[in-house]
Image (spheres, grey):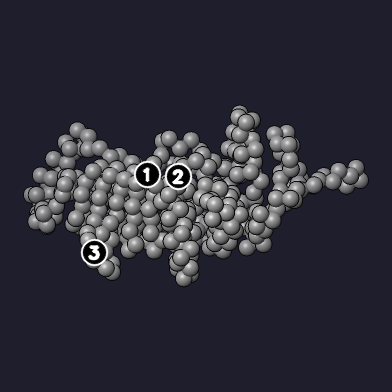
Amino acid sequence: MGTWVPFSGTLSKRLVIEEDENTPPNPKLMEFRFDKVFPVYAMGVLKPDPDPLLAVLSSGSDLDDPIWDAVREEAKLEAEKEPILSSFLYASILSHDCLEQALGFVLANRLQSPTLLATQLMDIFCKIIMDDRGIQRSIRLDVQAFKDRDPSCLSFCSALLYLKGYHSLQTYRVAHALWNQGRRVLALALQSRISEVFGVDIHPAAKIGEGILLDHATGVVIGETAVIGNRVSLMQGVTLGGTGKEIGDRHPKIGQGALIGASANILGNIKIGEGAMIAAGSLVLKDVPPRSMVAGIPAKVIGYYVDEQDPSLTMKHDASKEFFEHLTVHRVEGRSSGAWGQNESTGH
């Protein structure tokens, strides 16, 4: 990992390109000249060494970061189309040399307060993210999830700059790392700011996988002992809570690939199976079988998914006529073979 320079320490520094007719131009320096769009040069911040885990996200060399490359190109295009935003886009994205630093800058400016200064938050976010390869991977898989699954997400750049679901999720990741380091007062302070600014309440001790979508995000509540698997999508107003004053392990466990509809309430130490779909407004108090669709108050199984793709990826919340026609045939065949008996006997 290359040396990280705090953003607050670079405010007075600029990259000066000396033009000497006897010295051939340096293509790496010329690559970062934005003088056609911006009135200033890029700040001199060291670029971190390539991270091997980026090979998972890259279609080419492991020296590439396709997510960050896309963010920068999108920001340049937006600056050309909307010159009034050029300074904002420069400060938020184009003055940085990696996604980690840009994200730290954006989060710090969104969450700053009179007692939590942006420069202080920038130092906290960047030091945590730049030292944690797991978070580096997650912030990329999460932004890919927003781009792929949210039809209103115009670009990687817009997710990074504007979507509070992405912001609250990445701030949680920093708070979770702080919690695990024993810095729990600071972790709780970040939780409080996430709640105040974004309207999202995620306890820093919760365990959340990667490739997560918090669509709209307003009103999402995730309790202390909740566990969320990879590739899960949660809509606005979802509560993963307890059922009373019990202590210990008391919150839901969400299997990977699940889709949780808007305003669904999932309460208690129960398991939501992999690839399950919880319909909007449901109250879930019992375990949910894998790849099932549940709805109602209290929620009951109304069908099963038979295709291979997870509902969190398709983002299909409704049960169409075709779904129920297929379900009827599947249910009759299942009953004849006794395959459904166990699930029906559970009361789901």
Q: In which quadrant of the rendered view does residue 48 lie?
A: bottom right
Mark 2: amino acid: Lys
For disc 2, the marked residue is: 164
> Is 310 situated above or below 152?
below
In-front residue for pair 285/63: 285
Point out which mark residue 218 bears: 1
- Coordinates of residue 217 in the picture (x, y in percent): 38, 45
- Coordinates of residue 123 in the picture (x, y in percent): 59, 58
Are there few (<14), some (14-19), or many (20+) residues within 10 Å of tag 2? many
Measure the alpha-carbon separation of dots 3 and 2: 30 Å
Residue at (60%, 44%) from the top-left corner? 92
Q: Is residue 326 visible?
A: yes
Q: Nearer the viewer, mark 1 or mark 3?
A: 3
Circle 2: element type: helix
Residue with the most extreme top position: 81
In-front residue for pair 181/46: 181
Mark 3: amino acid: Lys
- Coordinates of residue 326 in the picture (x, y in percent): 18, 39
Question: Does label 1 or label 3 sit earlier along the sequence?
Answer: 1
Residue at (46%, 57%) from the top-left corner? 190
Are there few (<14), some (14-19), or many (20+) residues within 10 Å of tag 1? some
Q: Nearer the viewer, mark 3 or mark 2?
A: 3
Question: Does label 3 or label 2 sit earlier along the sequence?
Answer: 2
Q: Is residue 100 left or right of residue 233?
A: right
Q: Is residue 125 left or right of residue 305?
A: right
For disc 3, the marked residue is: 245
Q: Is residue 305 visible?
A: no
